[in-house]
């Protein structure tokens, strides 16, 4: 039996990513900017969760993000574990003009660190930075340095973003992709082929999803 | 039992107006909906800011409570005297109270059916079990944050749809006319997709704004029209479903008002939506694989092309070969479904719906139901007819210049056509699996 092969060049590595955060902070808009490079003013609130995919190239690898864009409304909170379970990455979003949404973001980070995958890469996104650009610092409720300090302390990537003008959106997904422990994932993905599975079975998304 | 307490409330018409702090614009609305908790706390109102209506909502709550306490009866309706003249209709479904206040000339049963549809939709978002538990723990709970903006927006959409969508008058599903053999193949596509998917409960293909193309279900479970309406309301009022796959919890109250099912929603073509329902919240990828199999079958069997044909509107004039009949609705009682012709441009849906509501009320009047009603030359220069036979209900609209004899001949032509083409117009049997 041959030694495990690294995946053929061009075979995408699947990365399950979940977006969490209070209602109306712009989770869906960030995803829409990343996946379709679009922006809609006054988008309707998400119901349940939307599932989208997007490939991006990081170094020599192709990463296929499988994105769960969850509803921010409290009613759907109890479903969140279903989406962040086994997720390799999470983007926790708040609105820079809402201190309350920042508190909610912190509680999501806490929940993820307690209940999420052990090595989940978490990025904190302070969205709607375009409002600060157009209306000045007076509109801001969450100082960037405060959020940065919190992110450092909690071990998170941190970006201020605008889904509206695109600021920081590519960067956040790129930096997440760079931080994913691919070697581990590939080792796990190849494990069954070696005939001996040293890892606990890790449910991975089916390979046949064709979108 | 219907309790008419109008006489005792003559003073409340002025006080109800005084209680409302809002503008004349609020009062000029022809129809209001209020949903409140047993406690009198607002849950949803159609017009205005519910936080400024505490007085009015308390009054409604007290009316219901007094009727219960002193007459051991459920308050059903109150007719306010002129000049306000609203008909207040109540639906008490603890822990919620739903009220319509309308001067639209809609009948009490029609308004009550609308309240029932609102209630059913609310339960599709928060199950009866959840509501009961929440209010048992916190009788003064404010439900609005929990319900959220998305559900409130959909309730508003639903309230407005009562005035523009005849589905709620017909109280059954609208079918898309399609040749029987083709419909069978759409059903086969769903069945093929369902093979080897143990967690699939219901599968349906919808068209446009909520017409049913095909439905598959387990042998042991049928699907109640009001549950289907909830699915349609959910799917068609949320534009995001057209652009990406979704996985959402939804309760179908007639199926089981205690728990959620999960709906996989994905549009196959811009006008054709696929909804797959499961009781397993983890079944998203299984449903996604079902979709792939359905699409694969549809591509191999030319059904994607066929689906384009469904987008072609059907005009009444094409059927009766006289360009006079503007619009019709034919409801088959045996199939519990209806079809309608395309609404010609320039014809307002709200006016059309109001006209048919008037006919429908006369047809279904409890004391003196009618078989046939012809209303000649209304203020829009149109004549309308409804015909209630053992097999169908037919509603038609003509230009007022059309003589009655011609209209009756048209109506007969449509009835004959519908009878002869029933197999293509209606879903005869939903494919089942065991």
Image (spheres, grey):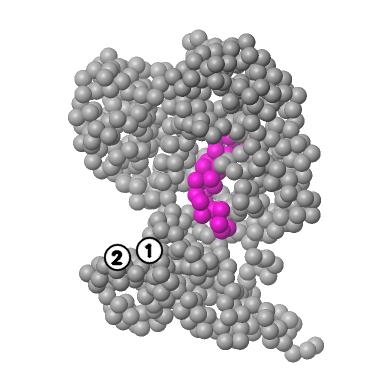
Residue A160, disc: none
Q: Position of residue B384 (x, y in %)?
A: 54, 18
Compared with B33, B2 (above or below) is above
Q: CA distance from mark 1 to mark 2?
A: 9 Å
Q: Tell me if label 1 and label 2 are in contact, CB under 8 Å.
A: yes
Say whether residue B210 is visible: yes
Is B134 on the left or on the right of B399, as rendered?
left
Q: A141 or A83: which is nearer to us?
A: A141
Say which residue label 1 marks.
A25
Residue B433 in the image: above or below residue B196:
above
Dots 1 and 2 on the same chain: yes
The magenta region covers B221-250
SS at badge 2: loop
Q: Chain of mark 2?
A: A
For residue B334, say whether it is visible.
no
Secondary structure of residue under mark 1: loop
Q: Residue at x 55, y 20 (%)?
A: B399
Quarter of the figure with residue B8: top left
Report the front residue among A152 and A168. Answer: A168
Residue at horizontal 56 percent and vertical 64 percent from the top: A52
- Where, by quadrant of the figure, is residue B140 drawn? top left
Q: Position of residue B403 (x, y in %)?
A: 58, 12
Q: Residue at the spot x=61%, y=80% of the render?
A: A62
Disc 2: which residue = A98
- Work out whether residue B282 or residue B133 is closer to the camera in this orientation and state it: B282
Q: Characterize the local packing of mark 1: few (<14), some (14-19) or many (20 or more) Cα atoms within 10 angstroms.
A: many
B132 or B243, nearer to the observer: B243
**Given the image, what chain letter belongs to the residue carrying mark 1?**
A
């Amino acid at each position: 039996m041959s030694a495990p092969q690294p995946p053929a060049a061009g075979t995408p590595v699947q990365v399950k990513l979940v977006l969490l955060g209070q209602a109306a902070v712009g989770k869906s808009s960030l995803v829409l900017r990343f996946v379709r490079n679009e922006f809609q003013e006054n988008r309707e609130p998400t119901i349940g969760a939307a599932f989208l995919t997007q490939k991006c190239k990081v170094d020599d690898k192709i990463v296929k993000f499988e994105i769960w864009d969850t509803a921010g409304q409290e009613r759907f909170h109890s479903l969140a574990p279903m989406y962040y379970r086994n997720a390799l990455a999470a983007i926790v979003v708040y609105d820079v003009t809402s201190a309350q949404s920042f508190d909610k973001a912190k509680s999501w980070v806490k929940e993820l660190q307690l209940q999420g995958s052990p090595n989940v890469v978490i990025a904190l996104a302070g969205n709607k930075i375009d409002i600060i650009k157009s209306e000045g610092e007076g509109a801001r409720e969450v100082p960037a340095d405060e959020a940065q300090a919190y992110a450092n302390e909690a071990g998170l990537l941190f970006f201020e973003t605008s889904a509206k003008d695109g600021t920081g959106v590519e960067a956040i997904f790129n930096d997440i992709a760079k931080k994913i422990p691919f070697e581990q994932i590939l080792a796990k993905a190849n494990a069954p082929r070696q005939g001996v599975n040293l890892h606990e079975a890790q449910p991975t998304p089916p390979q046949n999803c064709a979108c | 039992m219907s309790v008419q307490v109008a006489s005792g409330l003559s003073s409340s018409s002025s006080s109800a107006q005084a209680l409302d702090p809002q503008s004349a614009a609020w009062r000029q609305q022809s129809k209001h909906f209020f949903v409140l908790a047993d406690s009198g706390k607002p849950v949803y109102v159609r017009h205005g800011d519910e936080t400024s209506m505490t007085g009015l909502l308390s009054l409604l709550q007290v009316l219901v409570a007094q009727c219960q306490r002193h007459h051991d009866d459920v308050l059903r309706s109150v007719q306010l005297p002129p000049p306000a003249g609203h008909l207040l209709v109540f639906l008490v479904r603890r822990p919620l109270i739903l009220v319509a206040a309308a001067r639209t000339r809609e009948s009490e049963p029609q308004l009550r059916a609308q309240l029932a549809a609102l209630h059913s939709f609310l339960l599709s978002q928060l199950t009866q079990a959840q509501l009961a538990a929440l209010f048992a723990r916190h009788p003064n709970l404010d439900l609005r944050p929990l319900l959220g903006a998305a559900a409130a927006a959909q309730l508003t959409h639903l309230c407005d749809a009562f005035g523009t969508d005849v589905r709620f008058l017909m109280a059954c599903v609208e079918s898309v006319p399609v040749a029987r053999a083709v419909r069978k193949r759409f059903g086969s596509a769903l069945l093929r997709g369902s093979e080897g998917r143990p967690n699939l409960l219901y599968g349906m293909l919808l068209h446009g704004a909520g017409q049913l193309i095909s439905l598959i279900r387990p042998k042991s479970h049928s699907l109640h029209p009001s549950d289907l309406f909830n699915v349609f309301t959910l799917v068609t009022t949320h534009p995001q479903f057209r652009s990406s796959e979704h996985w959402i919890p939804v309760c179908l109250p007639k199926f089981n008002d205690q728990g959620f099912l999960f709906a996989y929603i994905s549009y196959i073509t811009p006008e054709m939506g696929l909804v797959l329902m499961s009781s397993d919240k983890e079944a998203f990828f299984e449903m996604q694989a079902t979709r792939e199999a359905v699409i694969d079958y549809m591509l191999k069997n030319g059904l994607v092309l066929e689906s384009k044909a469904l987008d072609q509107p059907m005009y009444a004039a094409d059927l009766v070969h006289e360009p006079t009949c503007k619009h019709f609705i034919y409801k088959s009682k045996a199939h519990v479904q209806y079809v309608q012709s395309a609404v010609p441009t320039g014809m307002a849906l709200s006016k059309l719906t109001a006209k048919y509501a008037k006919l429908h009320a006369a047809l279904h009047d409890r004391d003196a139901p009618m078989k046939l009603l012809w209303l000649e030359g209304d203020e829009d220069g149109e004549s309308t007819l409804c015909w209630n036979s053992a097999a169908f209900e037919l509603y038609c609209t003509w230009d007022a210049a059309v003589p009655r004899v011609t209209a009756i001949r048209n109506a007969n032509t449509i009835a004959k056509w519908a009878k002869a083409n029933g197999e293509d117009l209606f879903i005869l049997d939903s494919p089942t699996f065991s």
